Image: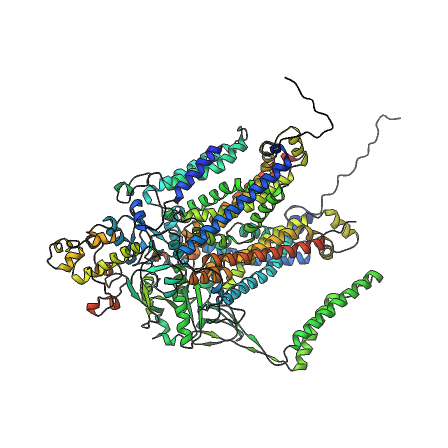
């Protein structure tokens, strides 16, 4: 008997065929798995080759980046023919941001931007106490602060010399414009419509038939009509609805329209959150002797609103895109400012550049916000799983 | 929390709402408010156009200024509210503006159905056509089959329909919401013809890529009496706008200008004396100071001065006086006497 | 102090203001009163405002002559027509752009949604980039962009692109031949209807036969053959009662034929491309919602990937897809109102634009416009709910 046992030594497994690993393997699996797929891939490659190089040429390589006026774009040297004229966009960037706001007061808009960021900043710290409450207050506080800064404090008589020099003089809303106005409208729209939306959502879920019917009617009315008609209504009909002598500014009327419209959509978002709360939570709240307002404010809404935060962010993105419609009723939001620039006699004929720039900027804003909302959604979902 | 909400709502209202009672007496409110609210075009060079600083200038703007001068003796006391063609009538009806000086055509239905009063005609205009020179079109009768760009909701849109219909010509109308869009579409070649009031054509031509490549056809296809308008029912207020305008026309007729109005105060001519408030109580009749017309002429100038400064031949708009000359010079501008 | 002890069985007598039912009635009454008061307040203000300033009101204006031209009308319309007819023209223009848009957006959306899940990495990436880029750019901007691009890249009428001498493309639109119907033309559509009815019965019969015997019948080819052949035969028998009117350059523009104006094309383009991105996402999530076991089971039954998708996955995914799809259709219809920004004469541009301006009757015009959209919305939701109920899983 020998103590040594012959142990079974399997041969090492063969490496996978060369065609299934590495770059070749990946290509075969993902691009050329069948004849049809290979054909599709080649077709797609051909299309990309036809689209992307000319686009890059137009956007970057052949584009005119430096210069003073249209003449620099009209006579490019032979090698850079058919490129975009970015000088126009550069010249108009202040207009795109501030619209027609007086030059010497633009720091007020900058200040509004900085303050908004500061107010919102604590929300990004996870350990902040009362984060949700603070968030709700911040959403409502930011547009008020911003609107006050945009508007200014002192309304001097036109004859007063300070009416054209004082740093805190009022600025008419017809001069507000550009990206700053777009952000303001979107934010006011969300801030003002959130409370209304919550009330409507609660009303719709209410067991009182008349209350819920009224809320359903309101929500469906605004969801059933296009925003543009709402804006037209607020600009031409609203003045007739008010008693004699009461007038709202044009911007205020647009804001009312935007708010009513987005309140109806937010109500549906919030309703989704309310429906996700298990019945037990309502019952437990009643069992503890909480009345309706208390059980809603302390038990149900905090949970429901937490779930719908991504939905609210998505509504904000939607509203941010929809504010472009105020350009149609003659206000100079970001798109309106782009159009103002396109009609500038000094820069006629470069509208496509203006629109492409606007598209890139809108894309960057909306895409990053939607990524953020997606990340938020994932985080909140794991928090809810048991 | 509740207080905060109330505060916020209050702040929002304070920013945007101007809650003065408007009742019957527009003049009383204007005086109390300290400024006239004047509805003007959004941007029409020569008539109403803001510069980069937001200062308004133009022929219609001068109308606003002369009213402020007559009431306050101060042309800065005007708040300009730019309105689109769609909003202008509601803005006046609802009291958002005190009056409109917005190259608006006086028509019967607007005077009756919409509840307005036109107080005068400060610019006699007519609708015309602008085309590219290289089309070799000499008059409007050659436009059969053309694509026509125009602004929606204006008398222009109706006139062009009437013109082509009565001449039994076919046409395609492309109607845009905003004037700038009409112009951009015409410039890009969407239409063969751009039509609006001839003064507007002249103004808009300056905004084209190459103004010299376009001509305005000689045909005038409509009457476009443009003038300021007020709400129906407050006659005193209408009188003030009307006479602020007539003061400018009378001043031209009497040879009074912004430069010589101070010497004219000593003129023995009774007509001048009455106009400038040296004789009679004509200002009081309007509810104003007696030097109301003096202020208008001193601060805005007479009709000719305003015309030449804003739209005359020396400006980029380059309009001859034509029918807008005084009646004494063969034109139509004729103001009733101050008596 | 004496403590009263109530009998356990008797219902506790609560004060009226603590009784939930009484409260509910009170709150509802209050809400109703508030809403009615608010409505009356607005009505009263509007009425006084209109009355005081002598502004005309009422709907009589719908019968008066419009006096303006509309560039695109599907029903006969001239300057002598009434405002009411102008509204109808606008409404039809809205509906036609919405209907065509819905069809193409659905097709493109399904292609993109399926491409997004393709095993071909490149195709999936392209679909992903398409969806993200298009969804994140405002529609109005896209409409302006396409309109600008069309206007800038197309030549004037005299340098038109000539397509086989029958169609012409320039910056006034795409001019295509128009069919001119002659006597006896009605037999062709009748043939078409007969073909459709026949196809339906063949379909039913084939299905029954398959259920009974398992034998398949080439339904698709037969149906296609019928639908093409019967109208064609009818046309030959009646001697081709149809000729084409070919557009020709006369004066400034092409005359005759049919024209697709650039406003229509760019609006349609933008609507289709924009909505398709959303539909693509919906289709993707709908397909993802079907458990993978379904695919594996159908493979196990011997179905190839194509039929698996068509017969197993899509029918189940439809239940997830239809509700959000409905709202996309409604969005497309509502978004078509952006036409007003580029002079396409849709309902909003014609009625709450031109007509409102000409008549000054803001309240009536806006009310009618909003009412029409609301009706379209409600009808579409109702139809889609019905359809949804029909395709819903019949659980036993």
Percent across and percent down for residue C104 are: 60, 60
Give me the residue at 55% from left, 46% from top. Answer: A264
Q: Is residue B322 left or right of residue A220?
A: left
What colour scheme has been applied to the protein in the rendered image? rainbow
Residue C246: x and y, percent?
Answer: 53, 77
Q: Quadrant of residue A349 in the image?
A: bottom left
Label total for image: 0
Looking at the image, which residue sits at the far front? Answer: C2
Residue name at image x 59 percent, y 52 percent: C278
Q: Is residue C280 left or right of residue B12?
A: right
Q: Is residue B152 visible?
A: no
The part of the image, by quadrant, that contains residue C383 is bottom right
Nearest the eye: B228 or C151: B228
Position of the N terminus of chain C, as image quadrant, is top right
Residue sitting at the far right: A1
Q: Is residue B206 above or below residue A5?
A: below
Q: In this orientation, which residue lies closer to the viewer: C50 or C160?
A: C50
Give the vertical position of A262 relative to C310 (above or below): above
Task: Residue lying at the far top in this picture: please name it.
Answer: C1
Q: Give x and y (percent) for residue B312.
A: 24, 62
Q: Nearer the viewer, residue B128 or B244?
A: B244
- Relative depth, front residue between B297 and A28: B297
Q: Would residue B245 be seen by someone viewing this image from the given angle?
A: yes
Can you tell which quarter of the image residue C197 is in? Answer: bottom right
Q: Where is residue A103 drawn, in percent x and y?
A: 33, 44
């Amino acid at each position: 008997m020998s103590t040594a046992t012959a142990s079974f030594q399997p041969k090492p497994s063969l490496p996978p065929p060369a065609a299934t690993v590495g770059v070749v393997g990946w290509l075969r699996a993902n691009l050329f798995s069948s004849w049809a797929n290979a054909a599709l891939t080649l077709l797609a490659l051909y299309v990309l080759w036809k689209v992307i190089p000319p686009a890059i040429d137009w956007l970057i390589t052949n584009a005119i980046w430096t210069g003073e006026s249209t003449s620099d774009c009209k006579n490019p040297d032979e090698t850079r023919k058919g490129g975009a004229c970015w000088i126009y966009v550069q010249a108009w960037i202040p207009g795109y941001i501030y619209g027609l706001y007086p030059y010497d007061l633009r720091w007020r808009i900058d200040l509004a931007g900085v303050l908004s960021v500061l107010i919102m900043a604590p929300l990004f710290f996870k350990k902040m106490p009362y984060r949700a409450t603070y968030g709700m207050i911040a959403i409502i506080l930011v547009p008020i602060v911003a609107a006050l800064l945009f508007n200014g404090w002192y309304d001097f008589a036109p004859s007063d010399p300070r009416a054209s020099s004082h740093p805190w003089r009022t600025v008419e809303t017809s001069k507000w414009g550009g990206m700053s106005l777009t952000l303001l409208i979107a934010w006011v729209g969300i801030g003002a419509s959130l409370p209304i939306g919550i009330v409507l959502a609660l009303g719709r879920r209410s067991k009182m038939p008349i209350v819920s019917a009224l809320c359903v009617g309101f929500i469906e009315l605004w969801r059933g009509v296009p925003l543009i008609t709402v804006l037209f209504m607020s600009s031409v009909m609203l003045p007739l609805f008010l008693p004699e002598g009461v007038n709202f500014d044009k911007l205020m009327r647009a804001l009312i329209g935007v708010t009513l419209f987005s309140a109806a959509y937010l109500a549906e978002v919030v309703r989704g959150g309310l429906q996700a709360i298990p019945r037990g939570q309502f019952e437990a709240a009643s069992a503890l002797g909480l009345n309706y307002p208390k059980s809603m404010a302390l038990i149900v809404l905090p949970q429901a609103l937490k779930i719908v935060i991504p939905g609210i962010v998505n509504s904000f993105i939607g509203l941010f895109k929809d504010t472009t419609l105020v350009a149609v009723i003659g206000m100079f939001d970001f798109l309106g400012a782009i159009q103002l620039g396109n009609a500038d006699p000094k820069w006629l004929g470069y509208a496509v550049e203006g629109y492409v720039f606007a598209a890139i900027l809108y894309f960057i804003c909306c895409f990053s916000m939607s990524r953020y909302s997606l990340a938020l959604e994932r985080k909140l979902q794991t928090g809810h799983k048991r | 929390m509740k207080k905060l909400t109330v505060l916020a709502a209050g702040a929002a209202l304070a920013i945007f709402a101007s809650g003065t009672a408007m009742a019957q007496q527009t003049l009383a409110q204007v005086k109390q408010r300290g400024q006239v609210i004047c509805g003007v075009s959004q941007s029409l060079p020569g008539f109403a156009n803001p510069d980069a600083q937001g200062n308004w200038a133009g022929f219609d703007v001068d109308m606003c200024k002369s009213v402020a001068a007559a009431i306050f003796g101060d042309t800065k006391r005007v708040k300009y509210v730019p309105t689109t063609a769609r909003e202008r009538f509601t803005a006046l009806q609802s009291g958002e503006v005190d009056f409109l000086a917005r190259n608006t055509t006086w028509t019967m239905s607007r005077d009756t159905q919409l509840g307005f009063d036109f107080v005068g005609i400060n610019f006699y205009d007519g609708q015309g056509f602008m085309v590219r020179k290289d089309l070799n079109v000499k008059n409007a009768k050659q436009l059969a089959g053309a694509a026509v760009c125009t602004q929606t909701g204006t008398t222009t849109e109706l006139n062009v329909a009437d013109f082509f219909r009565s001449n039994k010509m076919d046409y395609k109308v492309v109607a845009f919401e905003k004037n700038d869009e009409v112009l951009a579409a015409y410039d890009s070649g969407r239409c063969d013809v751009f039509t609006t009031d001839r003064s507007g054509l002249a103004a808009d031509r300056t905004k084209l890529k190459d103004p010299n490549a376009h001509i305005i056809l000689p045909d005038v296809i409509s009457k476009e009496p443009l003038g300021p308008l007020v709400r129906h029912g407050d006659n005193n207020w209408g009188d003030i706008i009307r006479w602020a305008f007539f003061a400018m026309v009378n001043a031209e007729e009497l040879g009074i200008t912004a430069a010589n109005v101070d010497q004219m105060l000593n003129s023995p001519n009774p007509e001048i004396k009455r106009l400038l408030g040296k004789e009679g109580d004509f200002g009081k009749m309007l509810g104003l100071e007696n030097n109301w017309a003096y202020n208008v002429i001193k601060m805005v100038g007479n009709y000719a001065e305003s015309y030449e400064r804003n739209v005359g031949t020396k400006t980029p708009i380059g309009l001859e006086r034509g029918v807008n000359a005084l009646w004494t010079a063969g034109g139509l501008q004729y103001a009733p006497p101050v008596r | 102090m004496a403590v009263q002890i109530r009998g356990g069985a008797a219902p506790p007598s609560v004060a009226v203001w603590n009784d939930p039912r009484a409260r509910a009635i009170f709150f509802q009454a209050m809400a109703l009163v508030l809403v009615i008061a608010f409505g009356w307040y607005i009505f009263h203000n509007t009425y006084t405002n209109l009355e005081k300033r002598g502004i005309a009101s009422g709907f009589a204006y719908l019968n008066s002559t419009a006096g303006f031209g509309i560039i695109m009308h599907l029903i006969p319309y001239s300057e002598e027509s009434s405002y009411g007819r102008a509204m109808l023209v606008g409404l039809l223009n809205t509906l036609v752009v919405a209907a065509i848009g819905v069809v193409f957006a659905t097709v493109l959306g399904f292609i993109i949604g399926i491409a997004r899940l393709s095993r071909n990495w490149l195709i999936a990436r392209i679909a992903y980039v398409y969806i993200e880029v298009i969804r994140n750019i405002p529609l109005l901007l896209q409409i302006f962009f396409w309109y600008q691009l069309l206007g800038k890249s197309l030549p004037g009428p005299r340098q038109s692109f000539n397509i086989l001498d029958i169609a012409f493309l320039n910056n006034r639109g795409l001019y295509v031949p128009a069919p001119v119907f002659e006597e006896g033309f009605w037999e062709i559509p009748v043939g078409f209807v007969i073909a459709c009815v026949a196809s339906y019965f063949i379909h039913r019969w084939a299905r029954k036969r398959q259920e009974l015997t398992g034998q398949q019948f080439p339904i698709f080819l037969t149906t296609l053959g019928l639908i093409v052949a019967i109208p064609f035969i009818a046309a030959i028998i009646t001697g081709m009662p149809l000729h084409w009117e070919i557009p020709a350059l006369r004066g400034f523009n092409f005359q005759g034929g049919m024209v697709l104006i650039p406003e229509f094309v760019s609006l349609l383009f933008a609507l289709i491309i924009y909505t398709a991105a959303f539909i693509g996402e919906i289709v993707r999530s709908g397909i993802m919602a079907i458990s993978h076991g379904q695919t594996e089971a159908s493979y196990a039954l011997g179905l190839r990937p194509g039929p698996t998708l068509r017969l197993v996955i899509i029918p189940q995914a439809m239940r997830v897809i239809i509700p959000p799809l409905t709202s996309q259709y409604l969005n497309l219809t509502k978004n078509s109102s952006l036409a007003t920004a580029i002079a396409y004469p849709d309902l909003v541009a014609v009625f709450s634009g031109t007509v409102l301006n000409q008549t000054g009757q803001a309240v009536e015009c806006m009310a009618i416009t909003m009412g029409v959209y609301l009706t379209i919305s409600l009808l579409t939701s109702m139809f889609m709910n019905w359809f949804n109920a029909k395709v819903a899983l019949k659980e036993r």
